[in-house]
Amino acid sequence: MKVLRFADLIASGAARGKRVFIRADLNVPQDKEGHITEDTRIRASVPCIQMALDAGAAVMVTSHLGRPTEGEFKPSDSLAPVAKRLGELLGRDVPVVANWVDGVSVAPGQLVMLENCRVNKGEKKNDETLARKLAALCDIFVHDAFGTAHRAEGTTYGIAQYAPIACAGPLLAAEIDAINKALANPKRPLLAIVAGSKVSTKLTILQALAKNVDGLIVGGGIANTFLLAAGLKIGKSLAEPDLVGEAKAVIEAMKARGAAVPIPTDVVCAKTFAADAPATVKAATDVADDDMILDIGPQTAALLAAQLKAAGTIVWNGPVGVFEFAAFEGGTKTVAQAIAQSSAFSIAGGGDTLAAIAKYGIEKDVGYISTGGGAFLEVLEGKTLPAFEILQKRAAG
């Protein structure tokens, strides 16, 4: 995937004295008082901003925050708390500018935060008039928000269409490189873990991966639907019986390529969905009518761990059991530790996956942790993200 990179512009001196507009992802969680409760995304945005400042550019940065109504700014929509935290990280004041669409005053070496971009009328629908106004604010547009790369909006697509120069920031470039390494040119065997409560939300991902991967590990409620497809009973476990046909088709598609969907041989069951419910390990053939499957069993986990340790590339999206409950975290913990110990290049994404990575302290052992939820899933589906598409077009001239 060929895109222009901000790092290359910096290296060539092309950003010096120029007006640089950075679209970051600063959509951080806040408590009821408006205090930021988790600042990973702000910290992740610092390298790009610092790069621009060090190059002597006049720097504007914006992001969406929450779900504001276009044209109706409320104090709770303000990026002011984000600007304050960013200022602490950079060791400088970061002024917040409101009503900025028609012009921004910023000098080389200065940094301003442009108020919540989703308040601007026409942002979500990528209105052309707005996009042209945004593009007129800058000499260089830098897209550094992978979490929004699947949306064609004013500050993610339209501005990239019309800005004099449009490029990928370091965060976006790293995502592109990791995705290419994992999916476009993977070292084989390529194993994918796709887990979650419903097949319906991940069906297109399963179908797309079935054409490319050497092993497709399913977990959570998705695995229960695949157990049904394999002719096994699942008691009162979460599943989607109406999608058994689709699950069978995925199994057959993999089989036709000499690949496999490993079906659990043992499972961990409970009679109720609760943290204190007694857990029982059973063969997958022995699930009772009143059982709920809440995790894969130790035998299955050990088999998967061996496969993961022998893999060349691993794509991970979703925990394989109810890892939030101690009695049902064994499968996810074993899988996480196997990924950490594997010499494979691993790419992981999705909120629950990131929570599992944090819980088991394996951040440094995963090859690449993707910051975009919906964008990561769309990449797995084989879709070309709008942000990638427009940046490729601009790079091609």
Image: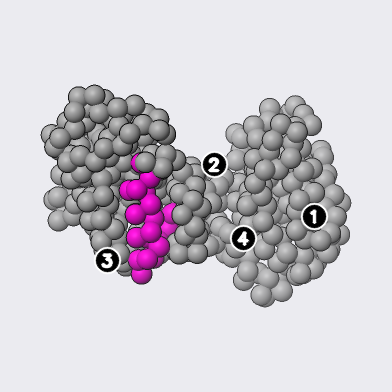
Mark positioned earlier in the residue sequence (1 or 2): 1
Image position, residue 195 (x, y; %): 35, 43
Q: Nearer the viewer, mark 3 or mark 1?
A: 3
Residue appearing at x 20%, y 44% in the figure: 266
> Are dots 1 and 4 in contact, CB under 8 Å?
no
Is residue 172 visible in the rendered structure shown here? Answer: yes
Residue 144 inside the magenta-drawn segment: no
Most common secondary structure along the magenta stretch: helix
Q: What is the three-letter code of the residue carrying label 1?
A: Gly
Q: Mark 2 sits on what residue?
A: 151
Q: Position of residue 309 (x, y in %)?
A: 30, 64
Residue position marked by numbered label 4 in the rendering: 169
> Does the segment drawn in magenta span residue 330?
yes
Q: Earlier in the sequence, mark 3 or mark 2?
A: 2
Mark 1 packing: few (<14 Cα in 10 Å), some, or many (20+)?
A: some
Magenta residues, start to end:
328-348
The three-letter amino acid code for the residue at tag 3 is Ala
* Residue 339: % across, % down: 37, 60
**Residue type, mark 2 in image:** Arg
Instruction: Say the numbered circle drawn on residue 310.
Output: 3
Which kind of residue does numbered mark 4 sit on? Gly
213 and 225: which one is in front?
Answer: 225
Labels 4 and 2: the sequence-earlier one: 2
Give the spatial CA distance, label 1 vs label 2: 28 Å
Viewer-nearest residue: 85 or 169: 85
The residue mark sitting in front, 1 or 2, is 1
Q: What distance separates the C-alpha of mark 1 from that of mark 4?
A: 20 Å
Q: Which mark is residue 87?
A: 1
- Does dot 4 land on a helix, a strand or a loop? loop
- First along the sequence among labels 3 and 1: 1
169 with respect to 264 (left or right) = right
- In the displayed structure, 311 sits above or below 250; it is below
